[in-house]
Image (tube, grey):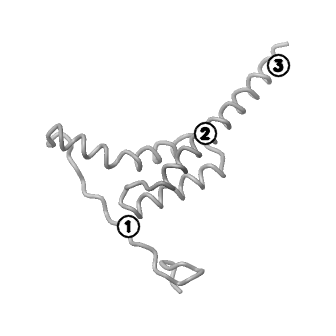
Amino acid sequence: MSTQSCPCCGRAFPKAKAAPVVNVAELSEKDMYAYYKRTAPVENVRFQLRLNLPERIRIEYTTLLDHLIARNGKPDAWANREYLRLQEAWRVWREYREGHERKMTDWAAA
């Protein structure tokens, strides 16, 4: 089996299509809205991956991004649920980290 196939069943993975370069300055308002609506799910996940994330959440976001790219950026029900779940996991982690840092700062100041 090659690296382009599933190690379990041997089926070929879908090939990623190269995204066309779009000059949004040349688009009409209607076309620009449609372009942003179509690309928003993938761009949202890419933005999240730029953040300081714990490794587990980063891996799950990467899996979601791969899923969206394989579906040409069109989210399905699983992708929507997964995105909301990962956002909540990130919020919980961030609140924990900020609360822990606040406690450490308070302790050092005392």
The alpha-carbon separation of the residues under discs 1 and 2 comes to: 29 Å
Is residue 71 positioned above or below 103 on the image? below
Q: Earlier in the sequence, mark 2 or mark 3?
A: 2
Residue assigned mark 3: 108
Q: Residue placed at 84% from the left, 19% from the top?
A: 107
User: Of tags 1 and 3, which is closer to the observer?
Assistant: 1
Q: Nearer the viewer, residue 3 or 87?
A: 87
Dot 2: element: helix
Residue assigned mark 1: 16
Look at label 3 and name its amino acid.
Answer: Ala
Dot 3: element: helix
Q: Quadrant of residue 53 in the image? A: top right
Q: Residues within 10 Å of mark 3 (few under 14, many from 20)?
A: few
Extreme residue toward the top, this view: 110
Look at label 1 and name its amino acid.
Answer: Ala
Q: Residue placed at 54% from the left, 59% from the top?
A: 63
Q: Residues within 10 Å of mark 2 (few under 14, many from 20)?
A: few
Is residue 50 positioned above or below 6 on the image? above
For residue 75, side relative to residue 28 (left or right): right
Q: Which mark is residue 95?
A: none
The alpha-carbon separation of the residues under discs 1 and 3 comes to: 51 Å
For residue 76, side relative to residue 25 (left or right): right
Dot 1: element: loop
Residue assigned mark 2: 88
